Image (tube, rainbow, N blue to C red):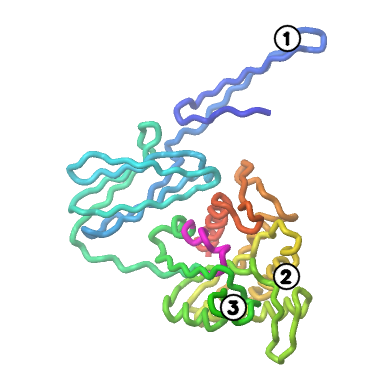
Amino acid sequence: QDATTWSCDRRDRHFVATGTRPGGGLALATFSVRTPSCARRFELGAPRRIGVGAVVRVRIADRWAIGAITPSLCITAPGKRRECRQAKLATGIAVAGRRFRVTTRGRWRVQLRLRNRSVASAVVVAGEGAVAKAPPTLLATGDSTMQGLDAFLGDELGDAVTLASDVRVGSAISRPAAGQGMPGAFAPELARAQTTRQRQRTTVVSLGAAEGYDMTTSDGTRVVCCDASWRTEYARRVRALMQIYARNGRGRVLWLTIPLPRAERRLESVRAVNAAIVVAGAGAPGVNVIRLDAVFTPDGYRDVIRYRGRDVAVRDVDGVHLNVAGTAIAARIVAQALRGG
């Protein structure tokens, strides 16, 4: 098995393999293939009209979802020359976002170019029109496993949402009240405060990498991680948060399970957390549980997964978090769930 570099412009590829037969003769095999062009690989999204002085958010999407390519994003202001900057998509990353401010009235041309060819384009008309109503708010919250995921989710969804991010590094549902300078418990009071402030239509939660603390149930019983009684109490607390974020039927909740960690000492608590999340979300109105553990760790921890026909390294060196490519894949899965629902 071997590979050759894919090319936009060299679409007809011819391969020849030679070898020596056991009797000494020459063995020859040939194969030809016509690869797809770049003509429809990329999608470029931008608002059609916008007010002068506003910031345009451009969404760059690789329809093949493989990344590993560096096109250029070019902006041509009315009466000006084209200005270009690289818009790198690393391996496994299919979406990127870029922004620019329109400073004059007229037609602003936006192009995505690859090897001096335009592969996608859009036109933004800047004028003095009414300011468009802000799209509905999506709250991305949780512990450190939400870091980076929120930004990629914003790139995936573009102008369809107003992204509000509230990451609480080190927080945990099972964590007791923290001392000064320490991460706190991810408690109903926090969820209510977030919801009062944001009035979000959708909440995406990634939380559970730092769990495992003893908890006290409503009747005063102390439960220790990670037996059935601990999982039951954890599920009760998760469901209470889900109900707050669901906003009496006015909101939607996507709660993410946690990919299994490398370290053995963390496995038990993460497995218990994931099991409790599934129980909590079962039958809860407006709630979907997204099984990221099944995507990234279907049969245990792994650094590399097979994604869209390619081996992609998806884990951070700490063995807990996803790396950039893994985070981009997770965001794509969440965005697809949001669009499908």
Q: CA distance from mark 1 to mark 2?
A: 61 Å
Q: Does label 3 or label 2 sit earlier along the sequence?
A: 3
In the rendered view, does 261 fall on the left or right side of 183? right
**Disc 2 target residue:** 272
Q: Residue 83: x percent and y percent?
A: 28, 41
Any mark on residue 185, and which? 3
In the rendered view, does 125 fall on the left or right side of 206? left
Residue 57, above or below 191: above
Q: Secondary structure beneath disc 1? A: strand
**Disc 1 target residue:** 26
Q: Secondary structure beneath disc 2? A: helix
Cβ–Cβ under 8 Å for marks 1 and 3: no
Q: Nearer the viewer, mark 1 or mark 2?
A: 2
Q: Does label 1 or label 2 sit earlier along the sequence?
A: 1
Disc 2 residue type (three-letter) = Ala
Residue 205 can be seen, yes or no? no
Along the viewing direction, whichever of 226 and 105 lies nearer the viewer: 226
Q: Which residues are magenta?
A: 141-152
Q: Residue 263: x percent and y percent?
A: 72, 58
Q: Does the segment drawn in magenta span residue 233?
A: no
